[in-house]
Amino acid sequence: MNGIKKDKLEVLNEKLKSEKGTQFYACPSMCTRFDFEKSTEHDYKCPECGSILEMDDNSSKIKQIELEIKGLSR
């Protein structure tokens, strides 16, 4: 495995760990996305447009990252 591929895998594994271990909240207009701590700091309001942040279902993001990891691991 070359260095670039290895670095990409490390980044993807860290991203996957973050997505699986963190609760995220996002603006319905897709302005912002925050982890739980940042969401509470902003009182669950988007600092860009003022909308109420909603819990983000990141299951599709997790699946996409897992597919990328699988593809690079071959």
Image: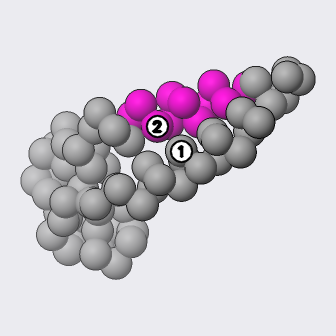
In the rendered structure, which amino acid carries the disc numbered 2? Leu
Q: Nearer the viewer, residue 19 or 66?
A: 66
Q: Is residue 69 left or right of residue 38?
A: right
Q: Callout 1: 10 Å neighbours few (<14), some, many (20+)?
A: some
Q: Is residue 47 visible?
A: no
Estimate the x, y position of residue 29 in percent, counting from the top left.
34, 78
> For the residue labelled by badge 1, is the local secondary structure a helix, a strand or a loop?
helix
Answer whether residue 33 is magenta in the image. Answer: no
- Residue located farthest toward the bottom when viewing the structure as drawn: 29
Residue annotated with mark 1: 66
Circle 2 Cα neighbour tier, 10 Å, few/some/many (<14 / 14–19 / ≥20): some
Instruction: Out of 25 and 8, give the one closest to the viewer.
Output: 8
For residue 19, side relative to residue 10 (left or right): left
Q: Residue at horizontal 19%, vertical 60%?
A: 55
**Residue 13 placement: quadrant:** top right
Q: Which residue is mark 2?
A: 16
Q: Mark 1–mark 2 contact, CB under 8 Å?
A: yes
When asked about the image quadrant of residue 44, the answer is bottom left
Q: Amino acid at mark 1?
A: Glu
Residue 64 in picture, x, y percent from top left = 54, 55
Residue at 77% from the left image edge and 36% from the top image edge: 74
Give the residue drawn at x 54%, y 47%: 65
The magenta region covers 7-18
Marks counted in the figure total: 2
Residue 35 seen from this side: yes
